[in-house]
């Protein structure tokens, strides 16, 4: 299983009045890690849309908030493929602090869809090969 990590600094704009990361901002951190994971494999989402009429969209997500993150902390956001199917990818993701405490866990199902019809389509073979599976 390929695992990827991405560092994220908590900025003031990410927090509430108490200096705690606002819950919805974790979704942004998770999205950035998935995007950088794909980019690291040479898969650029804007090129997929332009050249193949394919986009990846969040289908569903389960998220557990375990501990808070605070202003100015350096976080580590991981992304690992838990399941690769014909037209979807399920990621297991975590957000941890520098003390390696897990702050948040998420299971994120990403659907591969046609950018014009918004209907599910098979993930192209060149992508499944990059992800280490001939699904």
Image (tube, grey):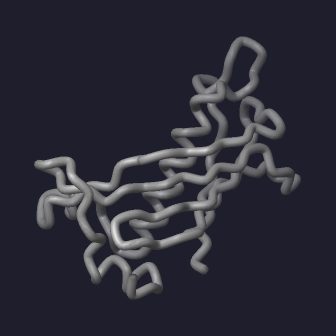
Residue at left offset 53%, top offset 70% = 83
Closer-to-camera residue (16/56)? 56
Q: Percent from the top left, x then y, of residue 96?
A: 76, 51
Q: Nearer the viewer, residue 40 or 90?
A: 90
Q: Dividing the picture into quarters, in which one does residue 128 lie?
A: bottom left
Does 30 sit left or right of 116 as displayed? right
Outermost residue toward the top in this view:
17
Residue 71 point in image, percent of width and height: 73, 30
Give the quarter of the figure containing the C terminus.
Answer: bottom left
Quadrant of the image for the N terminus?
bottom right
User: Within the image, what quadrant is residue 85 found in?
Assistant: bottom left
Quarter of the rendering containing residue 11: top right
Q: Report whether 24 appears left or right of 100.
A: left
Q: Is residue 17 above or below residue 62?
A: above
Q: Nearer the viewer, residue 134 or 11?
A: 134
Depicted 7 relative to depicted 42: above or below: above
Q: Residue at x 45, y 64 (%)?
A: 89
Q: How many marks?
A: 0
> Residue 76 location in percent, x, y?
69, 54
Residue located 55% across and 61% down the image: 91
Residue located at (40% from left, 63% from top): 88
Location of residue 40 in the rendering, given as x and y in whole percent from the top left corner: 44, 71
């Amino acid at each position: 299983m390929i695992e990827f990590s991405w560092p994220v600094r908590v900025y003031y704009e990410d927090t509430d009045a108490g200096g705690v990361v606002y819950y919805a901002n974790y979704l942004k951190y998770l999205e950035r890690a998935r995007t950088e994971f794909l980019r690291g494999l040479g898969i650029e989402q804007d090129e997929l849309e332009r050249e193949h009429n394919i986009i990846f969209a969040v289908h569903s997500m389960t998220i557990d908030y375990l501990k808070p993150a605070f202003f100015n902390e350096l976080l580590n956001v991981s992304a690992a493929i838990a399941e690769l199917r014909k037209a979807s990818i399920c990621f297991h993701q975590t957000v941890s602090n520098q003390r390696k405490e897990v702050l948040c866990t998420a299971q994120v199902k990403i659907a591969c869809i046609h950018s014009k019809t918004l209907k599910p389509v098979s993930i192209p073979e060149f992508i499944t090969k990059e992800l280490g599976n001939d699904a």
